[in-house]
Image (cartoon, grey):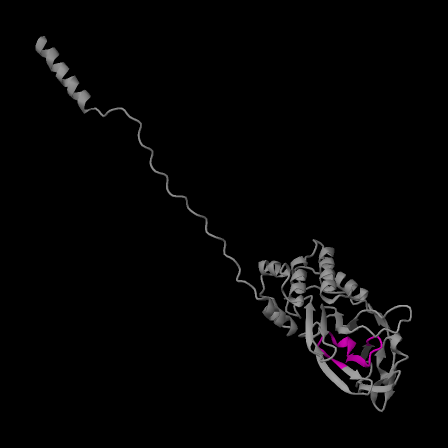
């Protein structure tokens, strides 16, 4: 009996010695935190290159600008005016579910243009922009407000040499030896050769007390193709000729009626009959619109150099 008890004690003691001691297991180390990859940023946009593309009416290059780049450009106070204005428009441009242009887009563009040009765009031009409609993802179309003898800008009348003109220019435009001429207070100046065929449109303006007339002739029903703008002195001197891209059609479709207004960027003359000199001219703005796009371009009044350009539809590249 004693031997059995001793044997049992020995076995039990051995088992206890071999059993692991009771202790709390060490927790496995947590893996190092995985840092989330930084979001891929759009390549930075060069405001000067964007400005150059606008002045060159390069809609193909502008179509490649991404939404984040547009937002950054519209907020860049140091960016050139044309680049910033165009970015503000593209950022705000949106259509409702029924295909109408969001009013905020027009408001954003108007504010940007006033800030850039220090002038309010013509009412008819803004209303044509508001008329934008799109259906099924198609490019936007604009209502030109065409009537038998007028468009959104108003009525036209038959002028000299069979040219259509605005009623306010009847008193100053004439035909002179095959030329369209302008009557300054110091005499008559020949502007350009009378357009052929007739029924072309002629838009004419000049600065307050200015000695230069600005004139553009174009086929109103020929669509928004580029057209020339001329600056002519009161002595009939051709000071410069520049090409306005207009909406820059690449093919003729839709109504295709082009409306143009030439606006001299200049502070109004002093009131009260003051003899102070006329305010300096900041430029010549060419507002134009047709059924597939709107544009505005500004030219240096002395040299004809283009200094500003904006387009609603990437000069016929929004497809």
Residue sitting at the far left: 3
Q: Is residue 301 left or right of residue 32?
A: right
Query: From which residue to which does the magenta span run?
Result: 206-230
Q: For residue 13, what is the image quadrant?
A: top left
Which is more toward the observer, 300 or 41?
300
Total label count?
Answer: 0
Which is more toward the observer, 153 or 186?
186
Residue 233: where, in percent of width, then height? 80, 84
- Is residue 255 at least partly visible in the picture? no
Q: For residue 276, what is the image quadrant?
A: bottom right
In the image, is residue 193 part of the stretch drawn in magenta? no
Residue 208: where, in percent of width, then height? 84, 75
Residue sitting at the far top: 1
Q: Quadrant of the C terminus?
A: bottom right
Q: In the picture shown, does residue 244 fall above or below 196? A: above
- Is residue 50 at least partly visible in the picture? yes
| Residue at the image point whose x is 77% and y is 81% from the top | 231
Residue 134: where, in percent of width, then height? 70, 60
Residue 215: where, in percent of width, then height? 79, 80
Q: Quadrant of the N terminus?
A: top left
| Residue at the image point whose x is 70% and y is 63% from the top | 140
Q: In the picture shown, does residue 90 fall above or below 266? A: above
């Amino acid at each position: 009996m004693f031997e059995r008890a001793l044997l049992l004690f020995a076995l039990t003691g051995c088992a206890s010695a071999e059993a692991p001691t009771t202790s709390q297991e060490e927790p496995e180390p947590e893996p190092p935190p995985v840092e989330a990859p930084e979001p891929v940023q759009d390549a930075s946009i060069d405001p000067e290159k964007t400005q150059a593309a606008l002045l060159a009416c390069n809609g193909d290059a502008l179509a490649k600008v991404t939404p984040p780049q547009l937002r950054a450009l519209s907020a860049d106070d140091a960016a050139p005016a044309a680049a910033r204005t165009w970015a503000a428009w593209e950022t705000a441009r949106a259509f409702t579910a029924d295909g109408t242009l969001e009013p905020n887009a027009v408001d954003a563009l108007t504010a940007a243009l006033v800030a850039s040009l220090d002038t309010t765009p013509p009412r008819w031009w803004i209303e044509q922009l508001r008329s934008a409609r799109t259906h099924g993802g198609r490019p936007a179309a604009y209502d030109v407000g065409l009537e038998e003898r007028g468009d959104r800008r108003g009525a036209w009348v038959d002028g000299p040499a069979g040219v259509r003109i605005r009623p306010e220019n009847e008193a100053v435009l004439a035909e002179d030896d095959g030329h369209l001429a302008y009557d300054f207070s110091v005499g008559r100046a020949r502007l350009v050769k009378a357009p052929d065929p007739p029924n072309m449109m002629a838009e004419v303006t000049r600065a307050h007390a200015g000695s230069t007339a600005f004139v553009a002739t174009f086929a109103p029903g020929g669509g928004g193709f580029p057209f020339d703008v001329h600056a002519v002195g009161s002595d009939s001197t051709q000071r410069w000729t520049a090409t306005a891209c207009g909406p820059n059609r690449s093919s003729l479709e839709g109504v295709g009626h082009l409306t143009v207004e030439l606006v001299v960027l200049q502070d109004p003359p002093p009131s009260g009959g003051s003899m102070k000199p006329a305010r300096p001219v900041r430029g010549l703005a060419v507002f134009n619109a047709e059924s597939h796009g709107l544009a505005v371009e500004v030219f240096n009044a002395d040299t004809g150099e283009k200094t500003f350009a904006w387009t609603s539809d990437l000069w016929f590249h929004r497809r």
